[in-house]
Amino acid sequence: MRPKEQERDELHRAIWAIADELRGAVDGWDFKNYVLGTMFYRYISENLCNYINSGEIDAGNTDFDYAKMPDEDAEEAREGLVEEKGFLSFRANFL
């Protein structure tokens, strides 16, 4: 086995050992669904935040940060965001 493959195998075993320790008595399938769902939700939340921030920066509002906006202000943009992006999530500061 080549050194790179050996390192990858060791990393794979280490990750599984950590996952087994973290999940405790929870079934592996349930744990995987929870982790992957959380990772996906985080991805779409950050994607939306970056999309909004870049639009505001392009418009000249360089100090804008969607994650720090009050909920009431963010709610005003909901309908337009769903129309533009096709989805809406809680802001990244909740994660």
Image: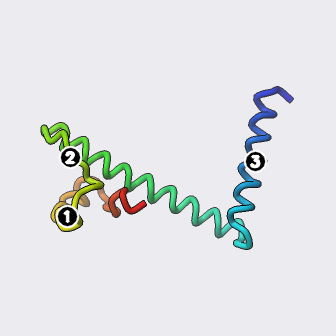
79 left or right of 48 in image: left
Q: Position of residue 19 (x, y in %)?
A: 70, 58
Local packing at callout 1 (Cα closer than 10 Å; few below 14, some 14-19, many 20+) is few
Q: Position of residue 78 (x, y in %)?
A: 22, 63
Amino acid bearing label 3:
Ala
Q: Position of residue 79 (x, y in %)?
A: 19, 64
Q: Do the CB atoms of the residues marked 2 and 1 lie less than 8 Å apart?
A: no
Q: Position of residue 24 (x, y in %)?
A: 73, 69
Point 25% across, 45% down: residue: 53
- Residue at mark 3 to residue at mark 2: CA–CA distance: 40 Å
68, 56: nearer the viewer: 68
Question: Which residue is tagged 3?
Answer: 14
Q: Is residue 46 above or below residue 82?
A: above
Q: Mark 1 or mark 3: name the one nearer the start of the chain.
A: 3
Question: Which residue is tagged 1?
Answer: 79
Q: Nearer the viewer, mark 2 or mark 1?
A: 2
Point 23% across, 53% down: residue: 84
- Marker disc for residue 64: 2
41 left or right of 62 in image: right
Q: Mark 3 or mark 2: name the one nearer the start of the chain.
A: 3
- Residue at mark 1 to residue at mark 3: CA–CA distance: 44 Å
65, 88: nearer the viewer: 65
Amino acid bearing label 2:
Phe
